[in-house]
C-alpha cells in the first residue's frame, strides 16, 4: 500500500447512505474494502449522503 491514503467522501442518495441495510453493507464501505484488498490505501472519511 502507498504511504499516503486516498481520502474518500461518499456523496449521494439512499443507495449511498445505505437505506434498508447496515452501514457495513453500504456500497462506500464495500468499495473501500475491495480497494484495500487490492492494496489501495483508501480511507472513507465521511458519508454525508441523504435519502431523497
Image: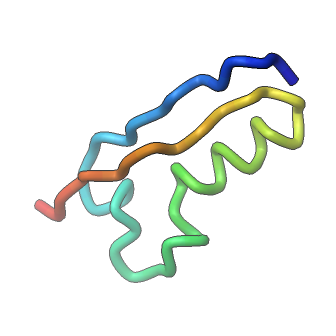
Residue located at (28% from left, 62% from top): 14
Q: Quadrant of residue 29?
A: bottom right
From this view, report whether residue 18 is shown above or below residue 42. below
Colour basis:
rainbow
Q: Is residue 44 left or right of residue 34?
A: left
From this view, report whether residue 35 is shown above or below residue 31. above
Residue 52's spot in the image, x, y percent?
Answer: 11, 60
Residue located at (24% from left, 53% from top): 49
Q: Quadrant of residue 36?
A: top right
Residue 13's spot in the image, x, y percent?
Answer: 24, 53
Residue 7's spot in the image, x, y percent?
Answer: 51, 28
Q: Quadrant of the N terminus?
A: top right
From this view, report whether residue 24 is shown above or below residue 47. below
In this view, the residue farthest toward the front is: 3
Q: Is residue 39 left or right of residue 5?
A: right
Residue located at (76% from left, 36% from top): 35
Question: In this figure, what is the number of numbered marks?
Answer: 0
Residue 30's spot in the image, x, y percent?
Answer: 65, 55
Q: Is residue 30 left or right of residue 41?
A: left
Q: Quadrant of residue 38?
A: top right
Amino acid at each position: 500500500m502507498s504511504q499516503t491514503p486516498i481520502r474518500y467522501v461518499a456523496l449521494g442518495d439512499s443507495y449511498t447512505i445505505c437505506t434498508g441495510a447496515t452501514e457495513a453493507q453500504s456500497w462506500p464501505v464495500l468499495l473501500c474494502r475491495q480497494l484495500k484488498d487490492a492494496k489501495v490505501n483508501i480511507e472513507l472519511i465521511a458519508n454525508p449522503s441523504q435519502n431523497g
